[in-house]
Image: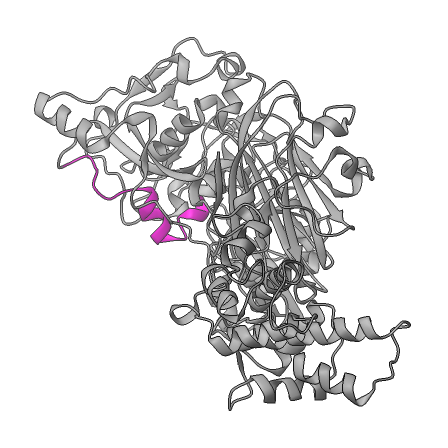
Amino acid sequence: MQGPMDRNANQLKLSGGSESPTMFKNQDFHALRDLHLRKGVLFNDEEFPADMRVIGPHLIDEFKIHNMEWRRPPEFCKNPHLIVDGASYFDIVQSKIGDCWVLSTIGSVTQKQTLLRNIIPADQGFTRNYAGIFHFRFWYSGKWVDVVIDDRLPFLNGDFFSVRASCAKEYWPCLLEKAYAKLLGSYQNLHWGDPAEALVNFTGALTLTLKLKGGDLHHSDIWEMVHKSSQKALITCISEKAEVMTHNRRYSVPSAMEGRDERRRSDPANKYIENIHVDNGLVDRHAYTVTDTAQVYREGCVNLIRLWNPWGRGEWIGRWSDNCSWWNDIDPEDRKKLNTKREDGEFWMSWETFVQQFSRVIICSPTLDFLNWGRDQRSWHKTSYENIWPKASGLEDSFNKDLFCKNPQYLIRISPSDEVQKGYNVIISLMQNHRNRQKFGRGWLPIGFLVSKVDAELPDPQRKMPGSFFLKDLQSGIHINKQRDVTKGLKLASGRYVITPFNADRSQESSFLLQVFLRSQGCTVELGDSQSFLKNEEKTQEETFMKYATQGGKMNSQDLQKFLNDVISKGFAPHGGIRFSTEASRSMLASMDFTCNGKLELEFFMRLWRYLNHFKAIFTDVDVDQNGFIGLSELRKAAKSAGMAVSSDQLTILLLRYGDYEMKLNFEDYLCCMVRLKSAFKRFQMLTSDGKGVYLTEGKWLKIMMSC
């Protein structure tokens, strides 16, 4: 089992790790190519052989396949190329199988050339060093892998069985999809699927599916997200009545790509396509690529979205389509820029029409900026865990609390500053092992996660929540689906929550990857994993206290200073780290010395340690620019997060006492300030019975002022 990864991912990188990928099935592209070049023979991939085994029984039955031909491009093309004049989504033409969910993703990838270069390495082609071998890169089970294939392509009745290119000499779409088929196990696994799964495999980035109707976001909010991210993100969508798992029924129609440009032509064979809405040109149960958004003015602002059909043809014929007269009513410069009249599968429509005709939008973004609203531009932070579901821990039809609590559990904290009015402040993504699809022979295992509010005190991090914790209503916080991934955006109030990923099949043990995206760092830990909370080698606070206490079971300021530098400063390193001064340790000891003997006893040491961990996490929350300093407004948020109501005048006094000449607190001064503030509140509670007022003699007042 692996623990947390990527704790401080301020920006999620699409291509992280793709520069040194793992070899899929232990096949080394360069070694295999060199070997076959020396032998003077073309590579035949025994791991994905050119026969009916890689097609799959369901496809064989559906298409009544008796004989499949396998041809290398040089065998039927005089001068083949991997890429001609750059890769574009206009290169792609869907053929027989129902792979629109993959092709819409590949179409999105072509708009991000840096990402495309990572997926399609440049050290290959049909000229120099050609040996019938190619390789491509995908994100697979939490890492990038390099997939090797040979260039034998499947043909049925003389026509491409899988995707074809619109240019007869170009073969990157065919070979890339063959490599993806190998990754998934067969061409059969291309015949249906979720665009979100393909987006994750091609990018490694977070992918979020948003319902246009009946979801938890209004479609106007989704427009804002799509419009904001259209230049950075990869976006696909599914037409109305489509399920996330799309399966396409087809019939044959003549192909038409004439007039695209001189170098591109369509194969004369018929192509197999899905059921068209004959009244508007859209395809039912079909995945499209979102290629752009725009805003134009025609009797007010109109939001437009541009889509591309993986068939390479078949376009919307309603308002804002290529030949719609409404284009004549907008600014001529906008019309010239946006309205291109070509039968290439790409078209515009209004956002309002889009919401009527489509069911889902899938956004895959290298950063999560599109989830920010208004002036909130804080970064998102990801924590990842790899773990295993044990047998007899699933959900199934009847809920067994004693079995369910055996699942891995993860505690998250939402501070008041992380609460949002619109959108989400938590994203949870759960992915099961890729092998499950083939391993169990009946598709993906049903997986999900439960999000449960912790109403009591902070759980013991070394223990999981017991079965009795899960007796509350399950339906409000449960998210489940029979897919590879379950990803959900949530808007949670401040507090602590337990995330429990589960596999609904109690008979199966399987591994998973959990990714939690929050607005603040260091707010996710695994329960039952002592190293998630204890940052040092000691197992208990008492053992730690005895290690540092040199005064017969008590700590002096020097002991405390050593503890602060060994333990509390760990994990906090802006500008090279932090070292606590003698004055800081004296100040904290005085604030916690409720017995007024100049020493720190175990009870108050444990209380101080809890305070420091809490205040340390709050500092990370409020220090938005992460420069290691906070001012008045951030101190106000920190006090509020710690449950202390303090006026602006009182906070100003604290800044004058503990801050620098700019009225700023560094991490050390902040902790001293917060500990003293907490101590003052605690002492007041000790001196008053009703929480409202207290009478002090001069002696008591002086004693408190000198010690607090």
Q: Is residue 40 left or right of residue 653?
A: left
Vertical side of 273 occupied by 238: above or below = below
Quarter of the image with the C terminus is bottom right
Q: Is residue 29 left or right of residue 625?
A: left
Front residue of 172/532: it is: 532
Q: Position of residue 101 (x, y in %)?
A: 52, 36
Q: Position of residue 430 (x, y in %)?
A: 58, 39
Residue at image coords 70%, 51%: 458
Residue 87 showing in the rendered view: no
Residue 205 showing in the rendered view: yes
**Residue 631 shown in magenta:** no
Q: Position of residue 38 (x, y in %)?
A: 8, 25
Front residue of 54/343: it is: 54
Residue at image coords 27%, 42%: 121
Front residue of 157/154: it is: 154
Q: Position of residue 454 (x, y in %)?
A: 75, 49
> Which residue reaches farthest front?
552
Vertical side of 203 occupied by 652: above or below = below
Q: Quadrant of residue 405?
A: top right
Q: Is residue 256 left or right of residue 468?
A: left
Residue range corresponding to the magenta coloring: 107-127
Residue at image coords 40%, 42%: 258
**Residue 119 shown in magenta:** yes
Q: Quadrant of residue 180?
A: top left
Q: What color scheme is it?
A: one colour
